[in-house]
Image (cartoon, grey):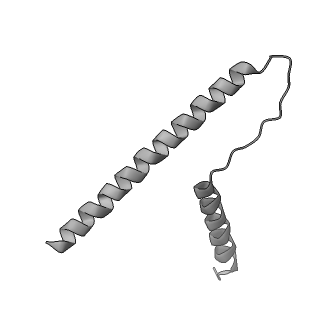
Amino acid sequence: MKRSFLYQLLFGCLILCSIVSYVYLQAQQDEFQISSQETTSTEIEEKQEVILPDLALVKKLIDVTKTLSSLAPH
């Protein structure tokens, strides 16, 4: 009984985190559209890559995995 409750709680947290991520990304996209409409077409801006903290963590994890796999004997 307790085990199924734990799974339901974890699944609920996962869904809640997904919804929060979606809302955050939509808010950032709306903010970007508003700010891009205010700029004039004569201004040339450099494209800047936006890296979210969770993506930076995933990239670091991938780099570490690549490093470890290159050190392992084949």
Q: Quadrant of residue 35?
A: top right
Q: Is residue 45 above or below residue 8?
A: above
Q: In the image, residue 68 lies at what x, y percent?
A: 65, 77
Q: In the image, residue 13 lies at what x, y percent?
A: 35, 58
9 vs 51, nearest the viewer: 9
Q: Is residue 19 above or below residue 58?
A: above
50 vs 31, nearest the viewer: 31
Q: Name the residue: 59% across, 37% down.
A: 28
**Furthest residue toward left:** 1
- Tell me if 74 is positioned left or right of 5 in this view: right
- Tell me if 9 is positioned left or right of 58 in this view: left
Total numbered labels: 0
Q: In the image, residue 2 lies at what x, y percent?
A: 18, 73
Q: Quadrant of the N terminus?
A: bottom left
Q: Name the residue: 83% across, 34% down.
A: 46
Q: In the image, residue 69 lies at what x, y percent?
A: 64, 74
Q: Name the residue: 24% across, 61% down.
A: 8
**Furthest residue toward bottom:** 73
Q: Quadrant of the C terminus?
A: bottom right
52 vs 68, nearest the viewer: 52
Q: Name the residue: 30% across, 56% down.
A: 12
Q: Quadrant of residue 59?
A: bottom right
